[in-house]
Image (cartoon, grey):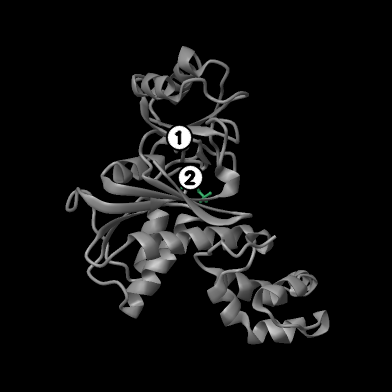
Amino acid sequence: MFDRSVSFASPTGTFLWTLKNQPRVCNIGARTDRYTRILGRSTTASTSGRWLRAHSRRLAVGGVFSTSMASADDLKKQVGYKAVDDYVRSGMVVGLGTGSTAAFAVERLGQKLAAGALRDIRCVPTSVRTEEQARSLNIPLTTLDEDAELDVAIDGADEVDSALNLVKGRGGALLREKMVEVCAKQFIVIVDESKLVPGLGVSGAMPVEVTPFCWQHTMRKIAALPALAGCRAEARRDAAGALYVTDNGNYIVDLYFEKPIADAYQAAQALRDTVGVVEHGLFLDMASVVIVAGAQGVYEKHR
Ligand SMILES: O=C[C@H](O)[C@H](O)[C@H](O)COP(=O)(O)O
């Protein structure tokens, strides 16, 4: 359940969260004997809450907690914080991704800027949502028009395959994300293990951004592409049933596959060649590093 060799990006956060949530305290108590064995100290389950509180710093520094106790948000926070701690330095131009995982990286960047641990950073946000979060944290912003070369970009993903190719855009931000992330010297992807897939297109939609002009015609063209054989195309709608509109004023066609996309490169090329398609959610050969949080802790996959 936990392992001396595992190191966590943000174990303190996980631990504090665990203590605050009563059902999880029981889990900790049940495992106290294992913690004490590692630290060479005896205690009883009944004193575990007090004992763990007193030793939380030592436990956190030792990094012995298992992410099996962590919530999905804890895992996202671990990778979001680690990406900023390990890959962002003062003076850099940074691409800020979109989504629930990327939001933790933005949060960390804001914290480090406020604390003076990072200075002279300029960031390019990949969506209106991210821009608003960054502004609320006083993160200095720039655009690709002013800063066309980024040192690093950090973003989540919907799927990651074994070659570190990605599906992105289930949150609707794919166009700006791809525009920004192709300009980064290093593109750091942050995910929890649930995003790792044996082949792209299996866990949900592969989004395609299309122009509103004759979008149904474009959707039919996409669905008929031989490189996408077997896909079902559906226009994305909001909760009220209206067509979903991206930050760029476009629509999204979601493609659903029963089997992994046979050849993602062919599929990407066929989509690029379809007039009316603005961008698609296949991010191929782009990720430099994928930081993964899972049951065995946090680890990196490099291209
Ligand atoms: O359009 C959204 C983006 O591509 C997100 O990065 C992606 O959907 C992953 O989001 P989350 O971290 O919330 O799972």
Q: Which mark is residue 74?
A: none
Query: Of label 1 and label 2, which has the lower sequence position?
Result: 2
Residue 166 at what x, y percent from top left? 46, 37
Residue 196 at what x, y percent from top left? 56, 41
Residue at image location 19% in from the left, 52% down from the top: 147
| The N terminus, quarter of image | bottom right
Vertical arrangement, residue 10 with respect to residue 47, above or below: above
Residue at image location 56% in from the left, 62% down from the top: 5
Secondary structure beneath dot 1 equals loop
Disc 2 residue: CB within 8 Å of ligand 1: yes
Residue at image location 17% in from the left, 53% down from the top: 146
> Of residues 6 and 11, which is closer to you in this image?
6
Q: Amino acid type of disc 1?
A: Ala
Mark 2 closeness class: few <14, some 14–19, many ≥20 residues within 10 Å: many
Residue reaching furthest to the front: 40
Residue identifier under label 1: 163
Residue 211 at what x, y percent from top left? 38, 30
Q: CA distance from mark 1 to mark 2?
A: 14 Å
Residue identifier under label 2: 157
Q: Is residue 165 left or right of residue 40?
A: left
